[in-house]
Image (cartoon, rainbow, N blue to C red):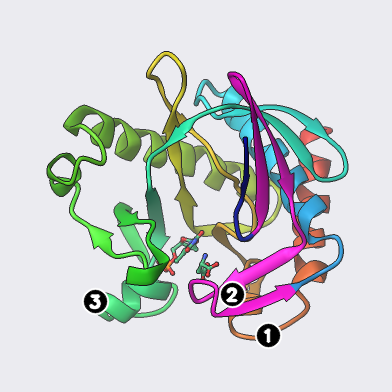
Amino acid sequence: MLYEGKTKIVEIRGDEAIVRFKNDITAGDGAKHDIFEGKGSICAELTAITMGYLNRQSIPTHFLDFYPPNTLKVVALRMFPLEVVVRFVKTGSFIRRYGGVEGESFSRPVVEFFIKDDARHDPMVCINHLETLGIASKEQAREMSDTAIRAAELLRGFFQRAGFDLWDIKFEFGLDGNGNVIIGDEISPDTCRLRRKEEIFDKDVYRHDIADPIERYKEVLEACRSIVSQ
Ligand code: TMP
Ligand code: ASP
């Protein structure tokens, strides 16, 4: 069974899956689309590094193995059609929705759920509606929220050691064969915001045509490689 998304190709093989990262990058629900040589391998390796780190910290992710340059072996999950965002800092759609000052920190992390539906521009959803909509039980929703916060806090420390501030991050979750709620998809500069002083090292450089994303993403990869090899 082969599924092709905007940036990855997933092949299910029993209770495992093979994920190949493409060189495609998109923004605005696919309205903006480009291909950058080397992008797939950078995001695959960063997913392997960050999810390997979370696995070692007892936060279960689907990551099992990295086959360079751009392929991961993962646990096959039945995905919730959700994006779970954890924010440490005001930016992006939070400011568009509620106003506020770019870069201002929250006193505690903020969690938001969005339904993955490009046609509806990924509408934000109230955690209490997930059961009514038949998307997730109350317990599963609570577990996704708690796990997302713990994972985001661990990764914030991880990226801090690599020299970057993690402003916000998006997770996707699925169920494994035993019904456990597990982090799936990817963790890369495509799925979070990473800053060093004023400089942007995440997909905002592409969304806002600021710089060559590959140069910035490579810097993140090299910094993360160096902290895991210490
Ligand atoms: P937002 O401020 O645009 O809602 O984004 C919040 C975080 O989620 C940011 O780190 C980027 C990430 N994100 C995705 O990974 N995929 C998406 O489709 C969107 C909208 C955001
Ligand atoms: N992930 C969405 C897209 O690829 C939107 C974004 O990340 O800005 O279109």
- Mark drawn on residue 210: 1
Residue on which disc 2 sits: 204
* Mark 1 residue type: Ile
Indicate the position of residue 175 as horizontal and vertical percent values.
42, 27
Residue 64 covered by magenta stretch = no
Above/below status of 75 relative to 220: above
Quadrant housing the N terminus: top right
Circles 2 and 1: CB atoms closer than 8 Å: yes
- Mark drawn on residue 98: 3
Boundaries of the magenta span? 7-34
* Mark 3 residue type: Tyr
Quadrant housing the C terminus: top right
Residue at the spot 56% in from the left edge and 57% down from the top edge:
191
Indicate the position of residue 58 as horizontal and vertical percent values.
52, 20
Element assignment for label 3 = helix
Instruction: Answer with left or right where residue 67 lies relative to residue 152.
Output: right
Task: For marks 3 and 1, give the CA distance.
Answer: 25 Å
Can residue 198 be seen at all in this image of the molecule? no
Mark 2 or 1, nearer chain start: 2
Indicate the position of residue 42 as horizontal and vertical percent values.
79, 53
* Mark 2 residue type: Asp
Q: Could you say which is closer to the camera, residue 8 or residue 109?
A: 8
Can residue 42 be seen at all in this image of the molecule? yes
Circles 2 and 3: CB atoms closer than 8 Å: no
Mark 3 or 1, nearer chain start: 3
Residue at the spot 56% in from the left edge and 24% down from the top edge:
57
Above/below status of 171 relative to 13: below
Mark 2 or 3, nearer chain start: 3
Element assignment for label 1 = loop
Residue 24 covered by magenta stretch = yes
